[in-house]
Amino acid sequence: MFEISFRIANFSDLPEMQQLFVDTVRAICRKDYNDEQIQAWISGVKDTQRWRQRLDEQHVLLALTGDQITAFGTIKDGNYIDMFFVHKDFQGQGIAGKIYSELEDKARELNSDYIDSKVSITARPFFEKMGFLVLAEQTVKRMGVELVNYRMRKMVK
């Protein structure tokens, strides 16, 4: 087993985070989304200003193995997981649960009663395992392409 450490992301981490996002969606989400949907989903990586804004405005936590980013998750406004991705080569090793625990602790520290997220088909089983309930299935459009996801919530108080 390997040692996992956590730290807050900074702007120099952005290229590695963006690559992790693209590689993970392409490799892991393929079973639930077609090529057109994946291309539409990862197109958001080009909006570097939006990614920089997340680093400025959200609690962005990195999980690291050595110097490599193995996962990242964000908390927006104290109770919304905006992004949550585990590196494609580190799936199924407990990293998701560990970084999620850190994010939930942060939400509690900020006195949140609940955590909300919009979760992909692929991530839904993990979030259910963490105690989230589906509030609604929804279809969102990105670049004119429809993607199914789920609004989910977990009470933390």
Image: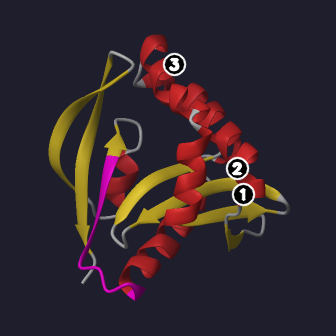
- Residue underneath mark 2: 14
Q: Is residue 32 visible?
A: yes
Q: Amino acid at mark 2?
A: Leu
- Residue underneath mark 3: 39
Magenta region:
109-118
Element assignment for label 2: helix
**Closer to viewer: mark 1 or mark 3:** 1
Q: Amino acid at mark 1?
A: Phe
Mark 1 neighbour density, 10 Å: few (under 14) some (14–19) many (20 or more):
few
* Placement of 120 over or under 72, stated as above or below: above
**Closer to viewer: mark 3 or mark 2:** 2
Label 3, label 2: how many angstroms apart (C-alpha)? 20 Å
- Kindly indicate whether the residue at mark 1 contacts the one at mark 2 (C-beta within 8 angstroms): yes
- Residue underneath mark 1: 11
In this picture, residue 157 sits left or right of residue 143: left
Residue at 23 percent of width and 61 percent of height: 153
Element assignment for label 1: helix
Queried whether the magenta region covers residue 112, the answer comes back as yes
Q: Position of residue 82 (x, y in %)?
A: 42, 54
Q: Amino acid at mark 3?
A: Gln
- Colouring rule applied to residues: secondary structure
Q: Position of residue 50 (x, y in %)?
A: 53, 45
